[in-house]
């Protein structure tokens, strides 16, 4: 079994090791994209690392993003060149080096209908050209992200047949990055860290942080133990203030709807839809490779922080109205197959005021006692956030470690796109598992039972793989985070019996190797 494999046996061994008196250099709290990124960064520098997560990998905000790897055009429009440049750099790193298998080029079209004026269109195009300048400056190749251009009304409708013909003057076409799936990125980060020796332990909730130890409750047994480390990194996102009350956040909710692609008619091209009355703000219509489309995204401040946020009715109406404003066919609630919402951990600075949409997406690294807290930021810049957090942690604890190595470190499954294109496996598997895809495909060929579909395109072999190698411990881990079947409730209900049976039998060793 690979050294990067995560499973129940490894979890038990890792938990036993850190609760038996082992002192790790860095203890990471939080198994989202930032926490997993911190664990990888620290392990890659040769430090001993343990990551503890109260639920499952990518349980929180990291699975509720728009699944974009974007170059920060919005920040450029606000004059924040530094953050836009950082985003463009990290987009290039993800798409060319660390995770080519999990990323792809996404065409983005701004349709030009009234009330978008000629002046508005010119300003938007100027922004796209400036963003392309950042792409060139960060040396992301043109064959991966082509330069923007204006398109005619006919070409716009060829790209997105569902666009409303009346009043359409053309469009502005640009290109950005898209993740196959955000939760799979987190799993790949955690597994890569595990391959370098990090202990990745889910279902382990931190209930107290002391100067020399952290209290952890095993979510499977209820046993309470102390874990010792030289420094702690709090990477719990919107829950950071729960562990360190001095951390002040202003969470913001981003809602998305899931609809059938046939109802929208955007093909493989995403739509960037201007929000009426809010210059510079847009809704996104994002096609996925499973025949679904995500419509997002809102940016509303929230006071309460639930474990799993829900989409309010007002957000549903808002998103349907904005998306429908550029479509030939008006979308209704009957078109909504599912929905999801995530909470952004925006830093509450004394100078911050106004809407949450206006708050900075810069990240912050804060220290208090022997705890480093990293908050803010966004999915695209997780690697930079992690590197900054580990820099602070090593300084705080006086640890001997060199600079970050993750900029040139491919994740599990990664390979150059030329190699990925030659793998003997279905394209859908390659885009989720990279170089491991042929092994999963072979499982289904060798055993027809493992090749059967339990949901659209998803096979029993993938469920078994998620338990044996990706740390899935429950059917929900598979449905909600390894496969995302549960983004549509009726799909989850249909697949749950088969997934439950497969997970149970795999955990009991009843599925042949």
Image: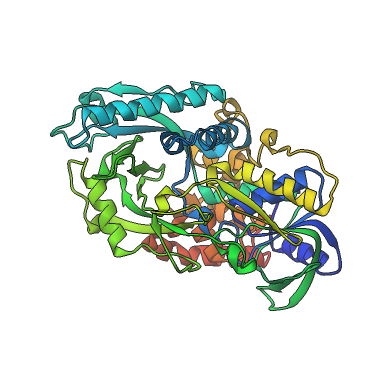
Q: Residue 215's spot in the image, x, y percent?
A: 73, 72
- Judging depth in this view, the residue of 333 and 240 nearest the camera is 240
Name the residue located 48 percent from the left edge and 67 percent from the top edge.
305
Q: Is residue 191 visible?
A: no
- Seen in the picture, residue 166 relative to 37 is either above or below; the reply is above
Judged left or right of residue 34, residue 309 is: left
Q: Residue 53's spot in the image, x, y percent?
A: 65, 63
Residue 439 sits in which quadrant?
Answer: top right
Residue 91 sits in which quadrant?
Answer: top right
Residue closest to the far front: 351
- Seen in the picture, residue 466 relative to 17 is either above or below; the reply is above
Name the residue located 21 percent from the left edge and 41 percent from the top edge.
327
Name the residue located 78 percent from the left edge and 53 percent from the top edge.
396
Q: Residue 333's spot in the image, x, y percent?
A: 24, 58
- Seen in the picture, residue 235 relative to 132 is either above or below; the reply is below
Judged left or right of residue 259, residue 195 is: right
């Amino acid at each position: 079994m690979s050294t990067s494999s995560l499973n129940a046996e490894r979890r038990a061994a890792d938990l036993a090791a850190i609760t038996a008196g082992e002192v790790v250099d860095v203890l990471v709290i939080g198994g989202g994209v930032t926490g997993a990124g911190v664990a990888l960064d620290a392990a890659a520098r040769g430090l001993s690392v343990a990551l503890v997560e109260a639920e499952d990998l990518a349980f929180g905000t990291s699975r509720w993003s728009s699944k974009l790897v974007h170059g920060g055009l919005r920040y450029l429009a606000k004059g924040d060149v530094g953050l836009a440049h950082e985003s463009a750099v990290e987009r290039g790193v993800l798409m060319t080096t660390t995770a080519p298998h999990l990323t792809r080029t996404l065409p983005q079209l701004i349709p030009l209908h009234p009330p978008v004026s000629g002046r508005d269109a010119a300003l938007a195009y100027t922004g796209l050209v400036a963003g392309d300048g950042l792409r060139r400056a960060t040396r992301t190749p043109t064959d991966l992200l082509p330069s923007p251009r204006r398109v005619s009304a006919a070409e716009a409708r060829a790209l997105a047949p569902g666009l409303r013909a009346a009043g359409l003057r053309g469009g502005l076409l640009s290109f950005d990055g898209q993740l196959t799936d955000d939760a799979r990125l987190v799993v790949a980060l955690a597994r890569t860290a595990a391959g370098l020796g990090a202990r990745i332990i889910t279902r382990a909730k931190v209930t107290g942080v002391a100067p020399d130890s952290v209290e952890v409750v095993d979510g499977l047994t209820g046993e309470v133990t102390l874990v010792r480390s030289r420094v702690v990194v709090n990477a719990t996102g919107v829950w950071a203030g729960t562990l360190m009350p001095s951390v002040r956040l202003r969470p913001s909710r981003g809602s998305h709807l899931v609809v059938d692609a046939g109802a929208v008619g955007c093909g493989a091209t995403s739509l960037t839809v201007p929000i009426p009355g809010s210059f510079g703000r847009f809704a996104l219509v994002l096609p996925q490779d499973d025949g679904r489309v995500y419509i997002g995204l809102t940016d509303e401040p929230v006071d309460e922080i639930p474990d799993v946020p829900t989409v309010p009715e007002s957000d549903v109406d808002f998103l349907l109205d904005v998306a429908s404003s550029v479509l030939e066919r008006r979308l209704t609630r009957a078109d909504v197959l599912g929905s999801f919402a995530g909470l952004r951990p925006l830093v509450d600075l004394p100078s911050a005021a106004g809407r949450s949409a206006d708050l900075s997406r810069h990240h912050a690294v804060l220290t208090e006692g022997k705890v480093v807290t990293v908050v803010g930021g966004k999915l695209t810049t997780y690697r930079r956030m992690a590197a900054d957090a580990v820099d602070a942690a090593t300084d705080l604890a006086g640890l001997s470690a060199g600079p970050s190595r993750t900029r040139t470190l491919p994740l599990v499954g990664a390979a150059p796109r030329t190699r990925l294109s030659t793998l003997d496996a279905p394209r859908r598997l390659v885009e989720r598992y990279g170089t491991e895809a042929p092994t999963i495909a072979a499982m289904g060929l060798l055993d027809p039972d493992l090749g059967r579909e339990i949901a659209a395109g998803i096979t029993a072999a993938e469920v078994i793989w998620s338990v044996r190698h990706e740390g899935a411990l429950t059917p929900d881990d598979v449905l909600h985070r390894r496969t995302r079947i549960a983004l549509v409730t009726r799909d989850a209900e249909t697949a749950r019996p088969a997934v439950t049976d497969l997970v149970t039998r795999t955990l009991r060793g009843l599925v042949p190797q």
